[in-house]
Amino acid sequence: MTAYNHTGLDNIDIQGEAREALPAGCITEEENALIRQRHPIPFYTPNIYIRIGLFILTVIIILFSLGILALMRIEGDDSFAVLLIVVGLICLGMLEWLVYSKKHHQSGVDDALLWAGTSLLAMKIIFFAEPITFIVQCYLIGFLALYGALRYIDRIMTLVVYGALLCIVFKTGTAAGAIGKAILPFVVMGVGVFLYLSAKMLSVNERYRLYRPCLVIIEFASLFVFYAAGNYYVVRELNALISDPPMSPGAGIPLGWLFWLFTVVVPLWYVYRGLMKKDRIFLWTGLLLIAAMIFTIRHYYHLLPVELMMTIGGILLISAVYACIKYLRTPRQGFTYEETNDRGLLENLHLESLVIAESFAPVTPAPGSDLQFGGGSGGGGGAGGQY
Amino acid sequence: MNLTVFKRLHSEGLISDTSLERVRIVEEKRLFSVHWELKTLLYLGVVMLSGGLGILVYKNIETIGHQTILLFIALVCGGCFYYCLHKAGDFSRYRAAAPDPFFDYILLLGCLSFLTFIGYLQFEYTFFGSDYRLATFIPMVVLFISAYYFDHMGVLSLAITNLAAWVGISVTPLRILRENDFHDHGLIYTGLALGVVLLMAGVASERRNFKKHFEFTYENFGTHILFISGLAGLFTFDGVYLGWFLLFAGVAAYFYREALKRRSFYFLLVDILYTYVALSYVVVRLLMKSSIATNDFVWFLYLGFFYFVLSAIGVVRLLIILNRKMRVYDSL
């Protein structure tokens, strides 16, 4: 189903594994060389920075080509919509040709052509939709993105398919009257669970190994969706949006206690499970969702002023991390504080120091004007740049 | 490592039995690293704590009093620097590893509270008089010394942004375009000079082998400041823009040579994109002038669009060729 050569994609994987095994001392230099020779990568995949450059330039080319064609159309009487379809299809055709004959794979050009082609077609569907309904739009965009995801193993396309699916479920649920609205959160949760389990099952199957990047994205998205479907804030506000007659502000929702329980317990369970099963997807999602949980609670109950919460939270976080690092000084229970994985790109760009410089930037006084140096809101960190 | 892959390689006769066994053992004993999770949480904690304290102080300034706050900040700062001096090994001109996981953060906290201290002093008591230069000069010196002595790349970035502030420019990635008024001609020349100085500092670090790993930070800041000042000059000095373009082209040629010499894809891309912007500006300007002169707008619009399509195709080809040329040395 993929446009790329299957053996080639496998070989990328194999060479990657060998590159990891070599410094770990598992395989010898000769074995690595032999593996690289027997499993060559046939693709044109330039360096990441070149890829970024090629992406930007390809987008420029497409936009200005569209501009030229639009200029020529000013004189004709065809609508812009036809132009979008034509250019979109040309992009997808070019993409097919480049992948087939020039062996482009993650070269920046193929990313740009795929995204531009599908976006142009999607723009036609969204902005020139006259006869078709919202739900049909969702189906069309969903299938378009499904094509991109399946044929080019694209993660963003996978997310678009997911989004379209959720829109369809939401729209169908709200159209199904009071009962449909009432069970909607549970239906969406069910979708999340179903997709998570399916993705998990498919990703252990060797047959679908090429789609693992997309399946991982589905796992992440499903965990988020499952939580969002039961999060008090999301349920309450969406309920207010679709309920008829309108809800009075401040009114609760049926089964409110259940959703509150869900809001608090699920992130903690994610983190717990992530640590128990050593599953990074659960761990990361859980850590992010703890923040979502705190924001949800704060939105309805002002327990403490924000600065006190930040101070106390900061102290708690720092002490907790301190304790963890001390505890893991020698690896325990299979956990370690040592870095084991490769940082690659991040390391090279020294991203951390840029982040520091950005978040703690000095104020540049305008020359000649009166001095406005310090102020109160800073205190050092994260103060929105206004010292 | 994926055992299935290695089993396959083994069955193909590409790796020996012992290698497969080693992979199996390593995989079995693999530890789950929580390094990045903990580091991110620690960073978050530091940001939350310092932000929370900042707001707390701001809201209670009448009851606490300025002296108390200043004293508190000074204590935090002094404590941090004491810890760092106590823990740090002897000064080394090479890369020095941090003595413990918290060292970097404590040094950062010390430097930031020092900045706050000076800023507070200046704002509340106009301690350094009405000349802001002294109030930015002192932190800059302290930051540079700390960066070198304790070997901290983040503090070096802070020092560079303070150096720029001292000469009057905002240089952090998000602010460089937003907060600088490039219509001020003096600022453009200052920017050019600052860029050159930073680049020279980078070259010197490398040549003298003195904190060689700082080179990238210097060059990164220097390159962007130089190019953006050059573009600003090109846009601002209307009468002599061709002269500025030639200057720009000269700088670009220098960077092109350097990037090839170092096999740096990053600097190559930065160089080519900035040059493309400058070239396109000149072309669009020429086209606009001609369209006004001949009063034929559509024709020149076509020309402009065609220029962009064709030139972008040209740059794509250039990038592909250069990539092939440097591919053997694939690194940054």
Image (cartoon, coloured by chain):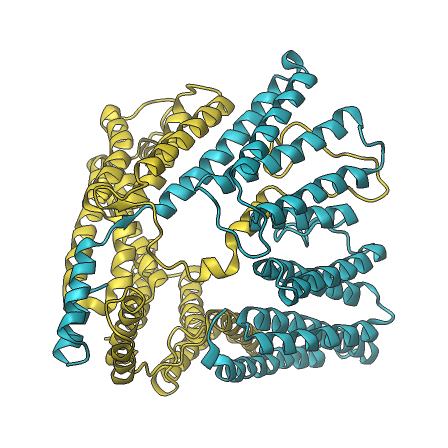
Q: How many labels, in total?
A: 0
Q: Which chain is yellow?
A: A
Q: Position of residue A124 (x, y in %)?
A: 43, 66
Q: Residue at x 67, y 47 (%)?
A: B144
Between residue A51 and residue A111, name the one nearer to us. Answer: A51
The quadrant holding residue B193 is bottom right
Q: Residue at x 35, y 22 (%)?
A: A251
Between residue B275 and residue A21, name the one nearer to us. Answer: A21
Indicate whether B51 appears above or below A134.
Answer: above
Q: Residue at x 37, y 26 (%)?
A: A297
Indicate whether A259 appears above or below B211.
Answer: above
The quadrant holding residue A245 is top left
Q: Which chain is cyan?
A: B
Q: Position of residue B202 (x, y in %)?
A: 66, 62
Q: Residue at x 30, y 66 (%)?
A: A20
Q: Position of residue B29 (x, y in %)?
A: 19, 54
Q: Position of residue B104 (x, y in %)?
A: 51, 42
Indicate whether B43 appears above or below B163.
Answer: above
Between residue A228 and residue A143, name the one nearer to us. Answer: A228
- In this rendering, does residue A382 appear at all? no
Left or right position of B125 against B306? right
